[in-house]
Image: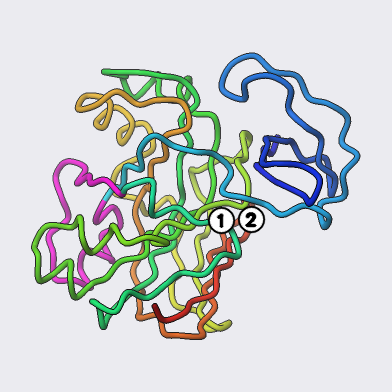
């Protein structure tokens, strides 16, 4: 099943579900008890929003060995995690804004876990019980500032630096799906999720040993090699096989 957040000229932002190319409203709590109403709204008449509103965005760094290598960094022995503020979130189709403080803003196409159930100290074997589904993300990064600071908050934390969507897919299998990222149609990144250093279960177990995960929280699972610079006027497209496509234009701030 695929869940969306959407709005129309007549409707304020709300959750819905997809049936082919039509949307039906969700009545109740998407992360608790709900029921699906009839799918009658054509998808093209709705504006899709970021598909949930997380309390936090947790990211995993260097979770593809080839990406660590391209930055002359060691592959971590335990998951390397960091946070992005919710203010980085933008909708599918919204503009990524290049901050004037940076001369090297790069794309990072990623598979994103959407948490469905609160948890702490979760064992890897039970991780699936805490997952609502999966979506697509772009961990946009001011690489020059990340390197200069040695800490990642500024380089990862600018407004518009976390596009994700277009929906949450509850049936997606993350074991072996191809991730591609294109800029203006030119291939920049391509790898399979099977190449992740740490599996989804391991990631959730590790993160939940540090902090409580809440319904709606996002976990960006890391990016493959091939990251590259974004420029004013670009369009960046992240495609995950069997999951969907996330597109965002880029403009100078």
**Residue plotted at (50% across, 49% down):** 176
Depth check, front residue: 250 or 108: 250
Depth check, front residue: 57 or 79: 57
Residue 71 on the magenta segment: yes
Q: Secondary structure at mark 2?
A: strand
Q: Position of residue 52 (x, y in %)?
A: 54, 39
Q: Position of residue 53 (x, y in %)?
A: 50, 38
- Which residue matches tag 1? 91
Depth check, front residue: 28 or 78: 28
Q: Is residue 242 above or below residue 146?
A: above
Q: Quadrant of the C terminus?
A: bottom left
Q: Which residues are magenta?
A: 61-84
Mark 2 crowdedness (10 Å alpha carbons): few <14, some 14-19, many ≥20? some
Estimate the spatial distance between the alpha carbons at disc 1 and disc 2, rounded to whole Å: 14 Å
In the figure, is residue 183 to the left or right of 44? Answer: left
Residue 90 on the magenta segment: no
- Which residue matches tag 2? 244
In the figure, is residue 223 to the left or right of 16? Answer: left
Q: Is residue 215 above or below residue 7?
A: above
Quarter location, residue 210: top left
**Residue plotted at (30% across, 57% down):** 64
């Amino acid at each position: 099943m695929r869940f969306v957040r959407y709005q129309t000229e007549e409707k304020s932002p709300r959750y819905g579900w997809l049936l082919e190319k039509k949307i039906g409203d969700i009545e109740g709590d998407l992360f608790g008890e709900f029921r699906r109403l009839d799918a009658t709204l054509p998808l093209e008449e709705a504006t899709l929003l970021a598909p949930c509103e997380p309390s936090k965005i947790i990211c995993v760094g260097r979770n593809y060995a080839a990406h660590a290598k391209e930055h002359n960094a060691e592959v971590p022995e335990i998951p390397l995690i960091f946070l992005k503020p919710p203010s980085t979130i933008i909708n599918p189709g919204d503009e990524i804004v290049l901050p004037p403080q940076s001369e090297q803003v790069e794309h990072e196409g990623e598979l994103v876990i959407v948490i469905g159930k609160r948890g702490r100290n979760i064992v890897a074997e039970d991780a699936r019980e805490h997952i609502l589904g999966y979506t697509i993300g772009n961990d946009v990064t001011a690489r020059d500032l990340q390197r200069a600071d040695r800490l990642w908050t500024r380089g990862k934390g600018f407004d518009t630096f976390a596009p994700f969507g277009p929906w949450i897919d509850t049936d997606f299998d993350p074991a072996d799906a191809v991730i591609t990222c294109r800029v203006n149609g030119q291939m920049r990144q391509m790898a399979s999720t099977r190449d992740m250093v740490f599996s989804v279960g391991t990631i959730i177990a590790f993160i939940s040993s540090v902090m409580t995960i809440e319904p709606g929280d996002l976990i960006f699972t890391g990016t493959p090699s091939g990251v590259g610079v974004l420029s004013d006027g670009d369009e960046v497209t992240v495609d995950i096989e069997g999951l969907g496509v996330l597109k965002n234009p880029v403009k100078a701030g």
